Image (cartoon, rainbow, N blue to C red):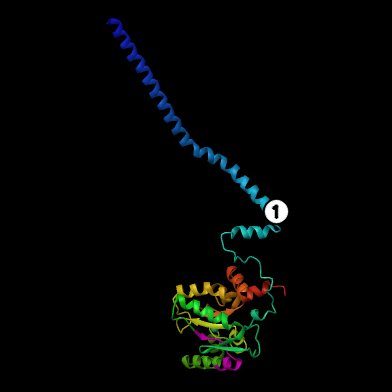
Amino acid sequence: MSTHRIDRKRKIRQRRILLTGITFLVLLLIITAIVLLVFKPFSTAVKSPQSSSTTAQTASKSSQKSSSPAQSATSASTSSSSSTSTNKIPASASKNDWQLVLVNLKNPKPEMNPDLVTLGHIQVDARIAQSAEEFLAAAQTIDPNVHLISGYRSVAYQTELFNGYVQQTMNENPGWTQAQAKAEVMKTSQPPQSSEHETGLAMDMSAIDELNAEDPATASAIAAMAPEYGFVLRFPSWGTSSTGIDYEDWHFRYVGVENAKYMTEHQLTLEDYLSKLDN
Ligand SMILES: [Zn+2]
C-alpha cells in the first residue's frame, strides 16, 4: 500500500509539473502573439517608404512605356472616369468651325442669316435642331417646367430689343444718360451684332421665365448634362473675366459634343477654348 501511495504522490507531482509546463507554454504563446500584434504595424510602417518607392518605380516605368508622360499622368488621374474621357483637345476643333463661331462685343458680326428651324416658339440653326430638342427633353426629366425661351434673333430684332431695354432703363432712372443706361443693359443683354443669339446656335432655356431665377440645383443639373447634347453653359459664374458677361443660368450655346465635353471638363469658356486652338 505504501509504495502505491508514493507512486500516487509521484504521479500527482509529475502531473503538476506537466500542467505548469503547459500553462507556461500557453502563456508564452499568448505573449508572443500580443508582441507580434503590437509591433507589426510599426514594422510595416518602417517598411512602407521602401514599398512606396517600389510603386513609384513601377509608375515611372509605366510612364516611360507610354508615348507621352504628360498624357499618362492625366489619364492616370482620371482613370476612374469613363471612356468618354477627353484629355486631348478634339482633333477636329478649328477656329473656323461653324460650331465655334465667336460673337461678342470684341467680335461683332453682321447679320448671319442662318438656315432656321422652328422649335416651339423659338428658332434655331437647322444643324442643331435635333440636339436642341433632345437637350430640352432631357432637361424636362429634371424639371418638367423647363422650356425654350429665346433662340435665334436677327440683328434687326436685337437692335429693337436692345434699344427698348435702354429706353426702359432711362425711364426707370430719371437723370441717367443714355451711356449709363446702355452700360446697365449690357450687363444682361448685348448690343446688336454682339449677341450670340444671332448665330442661331444659342438658346435660353429654363424652368422660370426670369434670368437666374431657376432653382440652382436644377440649373446645375441641366448644365451638367448639356455637353452630352453638344451644348455648354455659355456664361458660367467662373467665366465672367473671359466672357465679360455675368452668370446666366439659362443661356446655352451649341459647340458640338466633343468640344462641349472638353470645355466643360477643363472649365474653359468659348473665348478660353478658342485661344488654345492653333488654327
Ligand atoms: Zn441668351
Residue 205 to residue 165: above or below: above
- Point out the image quarter for the N terminus: top left
Can residue 63 be seen by looking at this rendering? yes
Quarter of the image where ligand 1 sits: bottom right
Going by the image, does 70 lie left or right of 248?
right
Residue sitting at 50 percent across and 79 percent down? 137
- Point out the image quarter for the C terminus: bottom right
- Which image quarter: residue 207? bottom left
Residue sitting at 50 percent across and 37 percent down? 40
Going by the image, does 123 lie left or right of 68?
left
- Which image quarter: residue 91? bottom right
Does mark 1 have its CB less than 8 Å from ligand 1?
no
4 or 65: nearer the viewer: 4
- Residue 173 x, y percent position in the rendering: 48, 90
Residue at numbered disc 1? 65
Work out which residue is located at the far left of the displayed protein and give it: 1
- Residue 250 x, y percent position in the rendering: 51, 80
Q: What are the residue bounds of the magenta stretch?
A: 148-160
Residue sitting at 40 percent across and 20 percent down? 21
Type of residue at label 1?
Answer: Lys
Work out which residue is located at the far right of the displayed protein and give it: 279
- Residue 32 x, y percent position in the rendering: 45, 30
- Which image quarter: residue 144? bottom left
Instruction: Label 1: state its secondary structure.
Output: helix
- Membership of 152 in magenta stretch: yes
- Membership of 277 in magenta stretch: no
Going by the image, does 274 lie left or right of 153?
right
248 or 95: nearer the viewer: 95
5 or 170: nearer the viewer: 5
Residue sitting at 36 percent across and 21 percent down? 19
- Residue 120 x, y percent position in the rendering: 51, 88
